[in-house]
Image: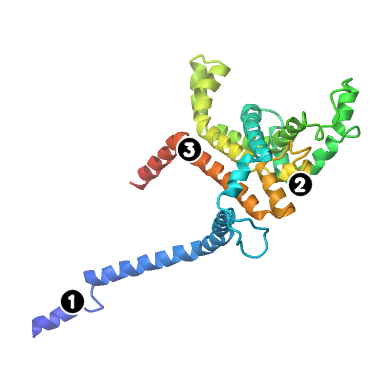
């Protein structure tokens, strides 16, 4: 009886003995449930928005692409793959694919190297470099609508600023119908795109340059490396992850380009500046061929998806593996 009393006393609330294992297990289980509920409560609003605003419209567009549908009521006239067959027989859409490729090549060949050169220049110790950074980044802050209206006035025939500048330096024959001439419209449109977006890539490169340890370039300088050797053998390899992300964003942006083209040219003249997104808008909201426009959207999504997966598999793989290794190492 005395031993029973002592045992009850040792397990009472006033003792310092740890609780039984079953009590600790119940406490851990309760904490896991609370953590799970907290995570779900924070993620649920974003998940609902993603499903309602992104996933369901994508699935419905895929469904509507197999119907001849004008956008009213539910699709009922099933045509199978006729929309896709007509799509790749349409010279306008085939031209859209070619113009998309042209924009991608021009962006990779001119816009990104120019942005990199400006980033390297503004990474030096220059007087007023913060002002220059702000000025070069400012066009990206402007909306595409404002940019389109602005350059519509700059490149207006005869009365625009561009024609006045060329006339002042004795090059009257260079200017003219910038956005109205099929021979010049894509080049002019690319100049507008470059002015609008190069500041974004410049800031990406500038952030990457500032993350490179200065000791490495100083060590290369001590070893006798010149400016070009330091850039090619030290700066460029360390900037490679930023370059790869910039290329990815530039290509995806060129494929999905719409608003700037619509404001400036609406795809004219005679479809010579039209992109896939502009063609989709024309058929979906101007001609009320929503099923056909849905097929265009599905093709655009497929191109972006294939490029993104291939780019991640063959280009970004090393960066992703390095990030995963770093995270695992930090967790040990």
Q: Position of residue 234 (x, y in %)?
A: 50, 24
Dot 1 corresponds to which residue?
10
Q: Residue furthest bottom?
A: 1
Residue drawn at the location 85% of the way across and 39% of the way down? 153
Nearest to the observer: residue 113 or residue 94: 94
Tell me how far mark 3 sits from mark 1, CA to CA: 66 Å
Tell me the quadrant of the picture where the N terminus can be found. Answer: bottom left
Percent coordinates x, y for residue 299 in the rendering: 58, 45
The x and y percentages for residue 324 are 40, 42
Q: Does 71 appear above or below 233?
A: below
Nearest to the observer: residue 111 or residue 281: 281
> Along the polypeptide, which appears first: circle 3 or circle 1?
1
Disc 2: which residue: 145
Mark with earlier residue (2, 1):
1
Q: Residue 301, position in %: x, y?
A: 56, 46
Question: Residue at coordinates 64% horizontally, 38% vertically from top-left?
Answer: 254
Mark identifier at residue 310: 3
SS type, badge 1: helix
Residue 120 figure quarter: top right
């Amino acid at each position: 009886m005395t031993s029973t009393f002592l045992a009850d006393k040792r397990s009472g609330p006033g003792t310092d003995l740890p609780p039984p294992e079953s009590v600790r297990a119940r406490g851990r289980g309760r904490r896991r449930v609370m953590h799970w509920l907290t995570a779900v409560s924070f993620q649920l609003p974003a998940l609902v928005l993603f499903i309602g605003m992104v996933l369901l419209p994508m699935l419905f567009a895929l469904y509507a692409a197999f119907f001849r549908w004008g956008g009213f009521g539910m699709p009922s006239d099933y045509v199978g793959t006729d929309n896709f067959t007509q799509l790749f027989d349409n010279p306008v859409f085939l031209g859209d694919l070619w113009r998309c490729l042209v924009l991608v090549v021009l962006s990779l060949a001119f816009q990104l190297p120019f942005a990199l050169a400006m980033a390297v220049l503004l990474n030096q110790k220059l007087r007023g470099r913060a002002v220059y950074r702000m000025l070069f980044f400012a066009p990206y802050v402007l909306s595409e609508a404002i940019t389109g209206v602005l350059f519509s006035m700059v490149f207006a025939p005869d009365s625009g600023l561009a024609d006045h500048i060329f006339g002042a330096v004795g090059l009257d024959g260079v200017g003219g119908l910038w956005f109205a001439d099929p021979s010049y419209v894509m080049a002019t449109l690319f100049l507008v795109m470059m002015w609008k977006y190069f500041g974004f890539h410049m800031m990406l490169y500038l952030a990457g340059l500032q993350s490179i340890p200065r000791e490495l370039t100083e060590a290369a300088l001590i070893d006798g490396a010149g400016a070009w050797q330091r850039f090619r053998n030290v700066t460029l390899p360390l900037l490679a992850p930023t370059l790869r992300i910039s290329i990815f964003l530039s290509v995806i942006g060129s494929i999905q380009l719409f608003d700037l083209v619509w404001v400036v040219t609406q795809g004219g003249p005679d479809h010579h500046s039209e992109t896939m997104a502009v063609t989709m808008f024309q058929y979906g909201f101007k001609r009320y061929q929503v099923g056909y426009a849905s097929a265009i959207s599905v093709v655009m999504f497929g191109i972006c998806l294939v490029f993104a997966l291939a780019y991640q598999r063959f280009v970004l793989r090393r960066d992703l593996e390095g990030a995963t290794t770093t995270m695992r190492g930090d967790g040990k």
